[in-house]
Image: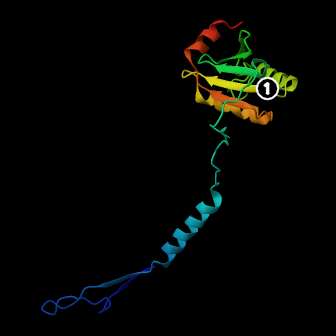
Amino acid sequence: MGMVDSPNGNRRPKKGGRKQRRIGFHLDMTPMVDVAFLLLTFFMLTTTFSKSNTMEINMPPEQGEVRISENNVMVVRIAGDGMAYCSLGEEAPRRISLYDPADSQRMALSGELRSLLREQTAKNRKMVIVVKISEKAKYKSLVDLIDELNLMKIDRFSLDDYTDQDEVEIKRAV
């Protein structure tokens, strides 16, 4: 703790005598250092170390063009209205709710979309899913869809630009 050193004890100097000497003060910092290190170790041990949320994306080589039959391509367009528009080849897109309406927190993709993806990839092992997302849609929708594809172990998917032609295709939706 703190301690005061006084050279003349509790006596007061006489009126005409010498000036009073300055009192020395010594502060023991050991307890404060102990508390600081205790708090430091407490916070280091009780905080959780979070892993960075990253997604592994494999980019195809840019050397050549890859040709795929239209019957092997399923396009999933995500518009800003919370709907997904799925089309296989040249057929008109099907309008499917992106999230399950019963899920108030919008955490899981709709069962209809999930079953469609599972069914189409089970039918055709060469199926490639092309995902296109509108600028009006939320980024979370894209991340949720890619997470769902990874959970279903569908690794043949591609991301593509959303164009004006996609808007025209959405208007053809059933």
- In the shown orientation, is residue 1 left or right of residue 119? left
Q: Is residue 121 above or below residue 18?
A: above
Q: Is residue 161 above or below residue 93?
A: below
- In the shown orientation, is residue 18 left or right of residue 149? left
Pick whichever, 47 or 80, lies toward us: 80
Identify the secondary structure beneath mark 1.
loop
**Residue drawn where x is 74% and y is 10% of the image:** 91
**Residue drawn where x is 51% and y is 75% of the image:** 31
Q: Is residue 30 above or below residue 115?
A: below
Pick whichever, 103 or 28, lies toward us: 103
Amino acid bearing label 1: Met
Mark 1, other Cα within 10 Å: few <14 / some 14–19 / many ≥20: many
Pick whichever, 29 or 7, lies toward us: 29
Quadrant housing residue 93 = top right
Quadrant housing residue 15 = bottom left
Quadrant housing residue 97 = top right
Colouring style: rainbow
Q: Is residue 47 above or below residue 160?
A: below
Residue with the mark numbered 1: 127
Q: Residue furthest right?
A: 123
Total numbered labels: 1
Return the x and y of residue 30 as percentages of the image width and height.
49, 78
Return the x and y of residue 152 as percentages of the image width and height.
80, 33
Return the x and y of residue 83 as percentages of the image width and height.
66, 17
Q: Quadrant of the C terminus?
A: top right
Return the x and y of residue 71 as percentages of the image width and height.
78, 18
Q: Residue furthest front?
A: 64
